Amino acid sequence: MISQLGRYEVLGELGQGAMGIVYKAKDPLIDRVVAIKTINLGLALDEKEEYESRFYQEAKAAGRLNHPNIVTIFDVGKSGDVAYIAMELLEGRELRDIMNDAGLLPVEQVLDIVAQVAQGLAYAHEHEIVHRDVKPSNIMVIRDGHVKITDFGIARMASSAVRTQTGMVLGSPKYMSPEQVMGKALDQRSDIFSLGVMLYEMLTGQAPFNGENVNAIMYQTLNAVPAPPSTLNPAVPEMANFIIAKALAKKLEDRYQNARDFAVDLRACRDTLPRSGKQIDVSSPAGGERKLPDAITATGSREASDEEARPAATGGLSQAFDSSAATMRLAALTGTSEDVDELTKTLKIQRPSAESIKRAAPAAKNTRPASPANPRPAVRQSPAKPSAKPGGSNLILIVIVLLVLLGIAAFFAA
């Protein structure tokens, strides 16, 4: 372990993230303990200058953000091939760890946490900064349930750092917006969609868009409409269903246009619920923080991460989604020509032929997620052959006895 980064004295290692190691360090000038996130600049020479310039630009932009729900950045620097950001040391836990350990939190606590994140995002968006990687592992919960957003601007730098690694997607595809999947320009509404995905997962225990590989997740993000969360968790109020539906709208014009309105609706919904009084446990787990790799290959293999730790339910998704080509063919059945062109650029594959699209049509019919109210398709039962009614033999015997009695009566009457 290194002992010095610039003027900072490294005290220990806090954990590892997608970009590098996070250290606990001390600033001797003002005797302040900070967290230092390092980013490796060991890139090819033609990329290093551009990436380093972008790193400082993004770090400075994030450093201008001064909001209670955004982690404070104190300093930025470079030591050898390692760039670093010095920020406030937060005594708390990542939201991802809390979700993994506690399961479903009370609905009113979930709404409060997400409303705080929305407030922080609204402030950043007003300063023309889009996060691009909103997910539970980038949210810290500290004392009294207070929330801080971390890693502003890191996502855009990260995408530059892996350009030479063909087939790599940095980040968590489960939380990407449709426009992010398509490789389009992003604005604040992309962060709102990602936060809506996080809210859905916190309320139901499962992500709204799931699949066996990144291509399946991308297809669902572009096409699938998730079931209302109240059908998976009866404690979720109807108002939350409408809020999430608006946050997860595929079309930008149908989505929340700013995070502040999103936060207002979340707080209004929370205020209709009784307070549980339960406090979130933010004490650090034994063994310290866990490594959170974010690299996922476009072919579907991936490094195990906390974001993907739980088995993903495919929600009725066809097994045919096992390649980028299959995703392209199926997207061509439902998307516009412009959207398909964008996706070909994102996946770096050729546009599917008319014949391959025709072959994909039967598979597309089987991709509709099953409704929670009817999770399995109804099985048509063959009509059963009519069987003899109970007691049929007894009825025949009674008729015979009556006929015999009538014959005896007629005999005596004669």
Image (cartoon, grey):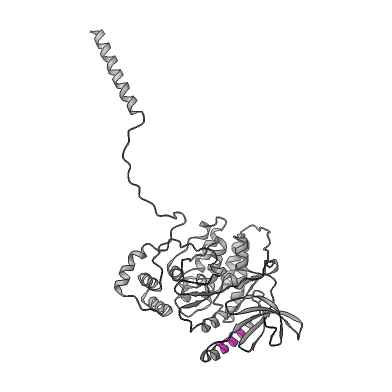
Residue visible at 30% across and 73% down?
354
Q: Position of residue 250 (x, y in %)?
A: 46, 70
Determine whether 228 is above or below 338 in the image.
Answer: above
Residue 1 appears in the picture as rendered? yes
Residue visible at 47% across and 63% down?
226
Q: Nearer the viewer, residue 349 or 45?
A: 45
Q: Is 318 inside the magenta-drawn segment? A: no
Magenta: main secondary structure equals helix
Q: Is 54 inside the magenta-drawn segment? A: yes
Q: Residue furthest left?
A: 414
Q: Which residues are magenta?
A: 51-60
Residue visible at 48% across and 76% down?
180
Residue 108 placement: quadrant: bottom right
Residue 110 appears in the picture as rendered? no
- Report whether 324 appears left or right of 89: left
Q: Residue furthest front?
A: 1
- Report whether 398 appears left or right of 207: left
